[in-house]
Image (cartoon, grey):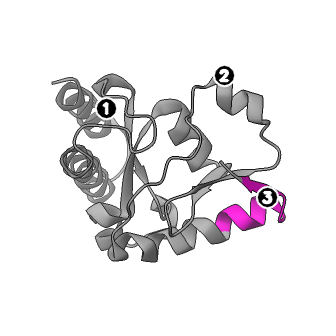
Amino acid sequence: MLEDTAIAHDITDILKSDVSETIKQRLVNARVGQGQFRENLLERWNNTCAVTGCRIPEVLRASHIKAWKHSNDIERLDVHNGILLAASLDALFDEYLVTFKNDGTMRVNGRIEKNDLDNLRIPQGVRIHFQDQTKVYLKAHQAEFEKTSNGNSFDW
């Protein structure tokens, strides 16, 4: 599997690095955990982008809702802190250019033009069903989105 090969290469690079053994172990554990996080999200979202319906594994990203850097170790691996997105949507989501409201509606930063969303083939009016556990993480993402959009946003 592609992901297993990528993890193996990353672990090899970590083990060859000049950091301390303690740091190496932490990095290896984190990388292995990310692989499991992806597998869990693939299962949770039925191997499908939550928005576009894309089923091409190579372009699907296991996206953290509450950012990795803002999460503790448990939150980083919690399947409820993740959403499976196509690569272009993952990039927008990761940069807080899109978020999702609790009702599953996509919210878009006003800096993004509607024709760009059309060009990316991002369907309009999709509503994602989020479990209550996921809405806790969405709150953190929504807050960061609001900071970047300065109130200039629209529903898609």
Residue 111 rendering spot, x and y as whole percentages: 82, 44
Quarter residue 11 falls in: top left
Q: Is residue 77 above or below residue 60?
A: below
Residue 137 rendering spot, x and y as whole percentages: 45, 71
Q: CA distance from mark 1 to mark 2?
A: 37 Å
Q: Nearer the viewer, mark 2 or mark 3?
A: 2
Q: Specify whether residue 59 is painted magenta.
A: no
Residue beneath disc 3: 149
Which secondary structure, mark 3? Answer: helix
Instruction: Tell whether label 1 touches label 3 (CB within 8 Å).
Output: no
Between disc 2 and disc 3, whose residue precedes?
2
- In this rendering, position of residue 28 left or right of residue 98: left
Instruction: Tell whether label 3 touches label 2 (CB within 8 Å).
Output: no
Q: Is residue 22 above or below residue 139?
A: above
Between disc 3 and disc 1, whose residue precedes?
1
Which mark, residue 88? none
Badge 3 density bin: few <14, some 14–19, many ≥20, Cα 10 Å: some
- In this rendering, position of residue 140 left or right of residue 71: right
Which mark, residue 13? 1
- The residue type indicated by label 2 comes to Asn
Residue beneath disc 2: 119
- The residue type indicated by label 3 comes to Ser
Which secondary structure, mark 1? Answer: helix
Quarter residue 22 falls in: bottom left
Residue 134 rendering spot, x and y as whole percentages: 38, 69
What residue span does the magenta drawing correspond to?
A: 144-154
Residue drawn at 38 percent across, 52 percent down: 83
Q: Specify whether residue 150 is painted magenta.
A: yes
Q: Is residue 9 above or below residue 130?
A: above
